[in-house]
Image (tube, rainbow, N blue to C red):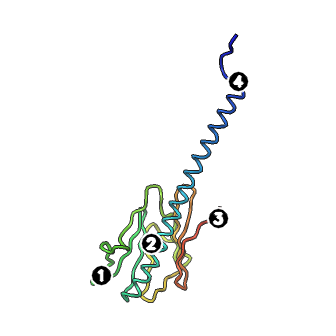
């Protein structure tokens, strides 16, 4: 006489395997969010450092401008208005990847609105700032200090 169906042990093993696979996929997705946010923070920190060096070399201020979907660097034009550095190979305007956004910008201890501007002077000085990137539960920030240092930093979980 042959029995049909699965034993309880077989069902539990299959459920355990499915649970492990789902857990691994969840960790992979969470890890990719963390990596994307960290990479964008590191990229912006390097771009801000480059803008700082360019401001010193050109003896002209450079302005960082954030928006809901990206950021750009601008310089004052002859008419006094800000002109985006669109043709610059490094400091051209950038769009953020989908789902990644700037969650907050704080300048000299005051939270900025949806659009924020940070002046990088020809002396290399910057007003202390914090730019927070977020995607899902992953958060990283770019910090600028009064002594001119700019660095990416993760949030402790």
Where residue 3 sits: x, y (%)? 68, 15
Give me the C-alpha separation between circle 3 and circle 1: 41 Å
Q: Secondary structure at mark 4?
A: loop
- Do tag 2 and tag 4 residues touch (Cβ < 8 Å)? no
Give me the C-alpha separation between circle 2 and circle 4: 63 Å
Give me the C-alpha separation between circle 2 and circle 1: 19 Å
Pointer 3 residue: 156
Give me the C-alpha separation between circle 3 and circle 2: 25 Å
Q: Secondary structure at mark 2?
A: strand
Q: Give the mark, 2 or 1, whose residue is nearer the N terminus.
A: 1
Residue at left 39%, top 87%? 57
Quarter-of-image position of residue 22? top right
Discs 3/4, front: 4
Disc 2 residue crowd, few under 14, some 14–19, many 20+, Cα 10 Å: some
Which numbered dot is residue 116?
2
- Do tag 3 and tag 1 residues touch (Cβ < 8 Å)? no
């Amino acid at each position: 006489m042959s029995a049909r169906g699965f034993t309880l042990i077989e069902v539990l093993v299959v459920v355990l395997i499915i649970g492990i696979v789902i857990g691994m996929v969840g960790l992979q997705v969470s890890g990719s969010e963390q990596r994307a946010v960290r990479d964008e923070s590191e990229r912006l920190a390097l771009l801000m450092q480059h803008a700082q060096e360019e401001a010193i070399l050109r003896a002209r201020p450079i302005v960082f401008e954030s928006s809901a979907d990206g950021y750009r660097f601008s310089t004052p034009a002859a008419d006094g208005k800000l002109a985006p550095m669109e043709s610059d190979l490094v400091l051209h305007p950038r769009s953020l990847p989908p789902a990644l956004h700037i969650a907050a910008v704080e300048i000299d201890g005051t939270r900025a609105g949806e659009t924020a501007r940070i002046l990088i002077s020809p002396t290399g000085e910057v007003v202390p700032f914090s730019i927070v990137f977020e995607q899902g539960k992953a958060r990283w920030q770019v910090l600028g200090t009064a002594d001119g240092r700019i660095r990416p930093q993760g949030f402790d979980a």
